[in-house]
Image (cartoon, rainbow, N blue to C red):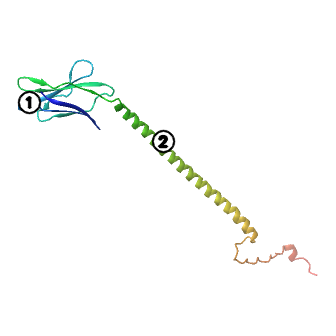
């Protein structure tokens, strides 16, 4: 009969492992794993497990339940069963999904806050530049007025004297 049946939790499921029978191990053709939670025994694996293999990976055990396992070693004429092993599946298997969701939500929230802060800083920078530009325009006008409308260092060009044109009446008028 198969011996030392164990169930071990790993990152992607549970491994059921056993050792080949001490006597007549060469007569074993295949193994079948049976399980039950409350009711009748059911086949865990679809098909058979080759005689050379002594472990099986199970991925779909429900957390919070207690499973009973046994391994059957089949030969040409009969089969032998291992001792029954009782294995309570921890309920925390479901909590992994909840924890992953919470962590993902928190990370999304942090990224949203960082992006919001960046957007506010960019908008404030643009607003400040616009205000500085408007201030510089006003400051330049005041400075220009104080400097006579010209930037310092540039000499003023004298204006032309106004020339008066005579009208027809003045041309033909009397000269004294």
Q: Please give the residue where the numbered disc 2 appears in the rendered image.
A: 109
Q: Quadrant of the N terminus?
A: top left
> What secondary structure is found at the residue carrying circle 1?
loop
Residue 45 lies, with reference to residue 148, above or below; the image says above
Q: Quadrant of the C terminus?
A: bottom right
Task: State the image coordinates of residue 28 (x, y, percent, origin top left).
Answer: 8, 30
Judge depth for marks 2 and 1 and give the one in front.
1
Residue in view at x 73 percent, y 65 percent: 142
Choose top left, top right, bottom left or bottom right for residue 92. Answer: top left
- Label number found at residue 113: none
Between 110 and 91, the residue placed more toward the observer is: 91
**How far is the residue under mark 2 from the one under mark 1?**
57 Å
Choose top left, top right, bottom left or bottom right for residue 48. Answer: top left
Residue in view at x 40 percent, y 34 percent: 98
Residue 114 lies, with reference to residue 82, above or below; the image says below
Number of callouts in the render? 2
Task: State the image coordinates of residue 135 (x, y, percent, origin top left).
Answer: 68, 60
Q: Please give the residue where the numbered disc 1 appears in the rendered image.
A: 29
Between 90 and 121, the residue placed more toward the observer is: 90
């Amino acid at each position: 009969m198969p011996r030392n049946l164990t169930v071990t939790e790993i990152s992607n499921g549970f491994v059921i492992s056993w050792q080949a029978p001490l006597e007549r191990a060469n007569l074993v053709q295949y193994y079948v794993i049976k399980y039950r939670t409350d009711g009748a025994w059911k086949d865990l694996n679809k098909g058979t497990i080759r005689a050379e293999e002594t472990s099986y990976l199970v991925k779909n055990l429900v957390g919070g339940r207690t499973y009973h396992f046994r391994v059957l070693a089949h030969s040409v004429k009969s089969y032998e069963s291992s001792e029954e092993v009782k294995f309570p599946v921890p309920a925390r298997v479901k909590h992994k999904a909840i924890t992953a969701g919470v962590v993902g939500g928190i990370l999304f929230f942090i990224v949203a806050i960082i992006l919001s802060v960046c957007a506010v800083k960019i908008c404030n920078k643009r607003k400040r530049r616009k205000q500085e530009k408007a201030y510089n325009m006003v400051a330049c006008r005041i400075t220009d007025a104080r400097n006579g409308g010209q930037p310092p260092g540039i000499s003023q060009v004298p204006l032309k004297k106004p020339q008066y044109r005579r009208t027809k009446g003045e041309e033909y008028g009397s000269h004294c």
